[in-house]
Amino acid sequence: MFALLSLPLLASAELIEADFLIVGGNESACAAAAQAARLGVQKIVLVNDIDWLGGQFSAEGVGCPDEWTVVNHTKTHFPRSGLFLEVLRRIRAHNSSRYGIACPGNAFCGTETIEPAAAEAIFEELLKTPVTAGVLRIERGWQPLRVDVLQGRITGVEFEPTKGGQERLQVKAKLTLDASDWGDVIRLSGAKYGAGPDLKARFGEASAPESFDEAGIQEMNPISWCMVLRETGGKDATIPRPPSYHPESFAVLDKLAPWVDSDMSGGIYSPSGNSPYTHRRLVDRWHNGFAPGTEATFLNYPTQDYPLCQLPQRVLDALEQSEPGASKKNIVTLTPAQRRIIFEDVKQHTLGMLYHLQTAVHERVGDFPQSFRYMQLTEEFGTPDRLPPKPYVREGLRLEALYMLREQDIRAASRDPMWAKVIPPDSVFGFQFNIDFHPTRRGFLSSNRNAAWRNIHTPSRGWHTDTDRSAFPLRSLIPIEMNGLIGAGKNIGVSSVVQSAIRLHGQMMHVGQAGATLAAMCLRDGLQPREISGDLAKIRDLQLQLVRGSGGPGVLLFPWHDLNPDDLYFEAINMLAVRGIWQPEPDTLFFKPDQPMTRRELARILTRLCRVLPAAKDWPSLKKPLYSDVSVEDPDRTTIESMSTWGDFPPASAQFSPDTMATRATLSDWLKRLRMPVANTLANEGSRPLTRAEAALHVWRALRGQAEWQPLPGKWLQPHGDYDGDGIPDYDDPLPFDRDNSNVPDRLKQPVQARP
């Protein structure tokens, strides 16, 4: 299906013509490739700079995904969905086959663990299926060199070999998704982007600095070079002393236990299980009874974090030698060769930590089977230094998007997350994670900038600040100006503060899956991404595609904690919630599918259902109360009496009985009186209490197939527009249809009625 031509000016170059170009091979890129193929995109090209696919799971060596949240004061994982859930199921199947148990790690930071080479194989399998055959082409060992832009639209990307050489690869594509580690396509295209801290003047964020200081624009969430280790059976595996090693840099390790005997039976993040060894343990043979030689862990401990500002002098000198002024640049703006200068020093730092654990720490705590002295770097990566081929990247380039998600949108008021201030109507996935900065700065212990240093947490950039349950908007994937481009990976429309909370394995897969769904719709309809984002009807189609899944589990759009893609009502409640028809209770994160509904709750939902239709009737003017048991002060009086006024209801009875249970017959009767579609089976067992799950299914059925109210395309999401008249320009308004920004669209809000 691919057209292969020769470029006239470059004899060694190859030209590939594609519909959809994906740059990068991380988990976000792989999710995008799988989703695009499943949605019928015919010519997909994925270009990766290394051989390995899978990003954080594999090439970055982070085999224990962080996905925890807090519910009822207890740490647990955030609900899994979409391609992330599909990959976790494959991981569990692999572990069950190899070890006889789905979760063999007993790690402090998470329940799921996978060895990197196995993870890479899983992602290879994800992209090698009958669906991808003939439509997906994967090119490896190429990095972006130049981006072609014609009349404000990216038309292609030229690549050069990662390992050097004169060969070139040219890919012409209708749409390009940038999931590269550092957003090189976005940067080279001239599209607007940010890197480093956002000043407080930009977004008004509480955690943002007022001005730049010594750290300047280089301050970012640090990178880390992970290490995967396997037991040697008692053989001394101490590595050679790294040239830049200074024991004072790792003094914090001299104050804690390097290993604790814990099977994490108390759950993830149980304090008794925290140690460098158990922090991200991959395979726990001691507590699971596995054969000798299977024990494995990996190190991604805060001590090995490498700040990207206040660099050692040797690094500064090497950067300046490569290009005058390079030492003052943010890593995003450096060339790949210049980044490798930093990477080599990162590797030396991480090997220094391993050496310290194998020597100074071992000598302090004595000889024991789980000592790091008897753990050796695994050979599974196939690299000369036995380290992963890539660093673990927490923060990169941030696309200047149609909406920039910011701290106040997601920030929590307490340590027990509830609902965020903002849940955007164009949600493409729900999320929650802490504003989680690892140490962003470096402090040298002497005047010698090539000697010992320690990383530093600043008061505003730490890992103990919280967010609430929120959702990621489609608009944050779309450039504010450039066409033909979709952001992915960490190259998305968020502030630096928010990026610290949106960088996990699952979140990045959701970003890629959403971006590919957007691309498939654009290619199908011949539209640009910004045209989709400005058309609410198309946004609803895109959300429906995501929530239904494509050959796999659907994506959670609204962040309830107790929804599973396998639930029959999963689609219904997600689609009703993103419209504002079904709103969450303020004091619980649970949908509670089996809980019976009251008549007042049902009236609220049916009233909003009526209001979302194009020909919705105006709110009636309330005078004398219709029902003796629904007083003037009752907060639901407007919805109850509006429903009775709009529908074909008989003269009101004396009482409405708002707090009694609604039955299946109640919903059937009310839908008929409101002239809505009704399932014939709803009246069966009509006296049975109506559960929330049943109500969601039938209300969604009533809405499906009907036209809905839509703001006219071109009348909102305009550069200088303010559709809802709240004084916030559309490009800065996370809730563009909600004048008082209460997460309820204005059209669905009941008016404040004057008392008679």
Image (tube, rainbow, N blue to C red):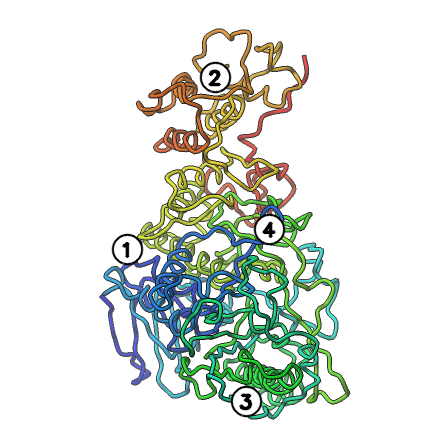
The Cα–Cα distance between marks 3 and 4, rounded to whole angstroms, is 39 Å
Q: What is the number of the mark on residue 414?
A: none
Which kind of residue does numbered mark 2 sit on? Trp
The Cα–Cα distance between marks 2 and 4, rounded to whole angstroms, is 45 Å
399 or 71: which is nearer to us? Answer: 71
Category of crowding for the residue at label 3, using alpha-carbon neighbours closer than 10 angstroms: few (below 14), some (14–19), many (at least 20): some
* One can see residue 399 in this view: no
Quadrant position of residue 75:
bottom right
Look at mark 2 in the image and give the residue it sits on: 646
Quadrant position of residue 131:
bottom left
Task: Residue at 60% x, 91% y: name it.
Answer: 321
Look at mark 4 in the image and give the residue it sits on: 74
Which kind of residue does numbered mark 1 sit on? Gly
* Tag 2 near tag 4, CB within 8 Å: no
Q: Is residue 481 above or below residue 117?
A: above
Q: In terms of sequence position, does the residue under pointer 2 or pointer 1 come before the other?
A: 1
263 or 575: which is nearer to us? Answer: 263
Q: Position of residue 412 (x, y in %)?
A: 65, 49
Compared across the picture, whether 458 is left or right of 156 comes to right
Category of crowding for the residue at label 1, using alpha-carbon neighbours closer than 10 angstroms: few (below 14), some (14–19), many (at least 20): few
Q: In terms of sequence position, does the residue under pointer 3 or pointer 1 come before the other?
A: 1
Category of crowding for the residue at label 2, using alpha-carbon neighbours closer than 10 angstroms: few (below 14), some (14–19), many (at least 20): some
- Residue with the most extreme right position: 447
Q: In terms of sequence position, does the residue under pointer 2 or pointer 4 come before the other?
A: 4
Which kind of residue does numbered mark 4 sit on? Thr
Compared across the picture, whether 98 is left or right of 373 comes to left
Q: What is the number of the mark on residue 238?
A: 3
Q: In terms of sequence position, does the residue under pointer 2 or pointer 3 come before the other?
A: 3
* Tag 4 near tag 1, CB within 8 Å: no
Look at mark 1 in the image and give the residue it sits on: 40
Q: Is residue 187 above or below residue 231?
A: above
- Secondary structure under tag 2 reads helix
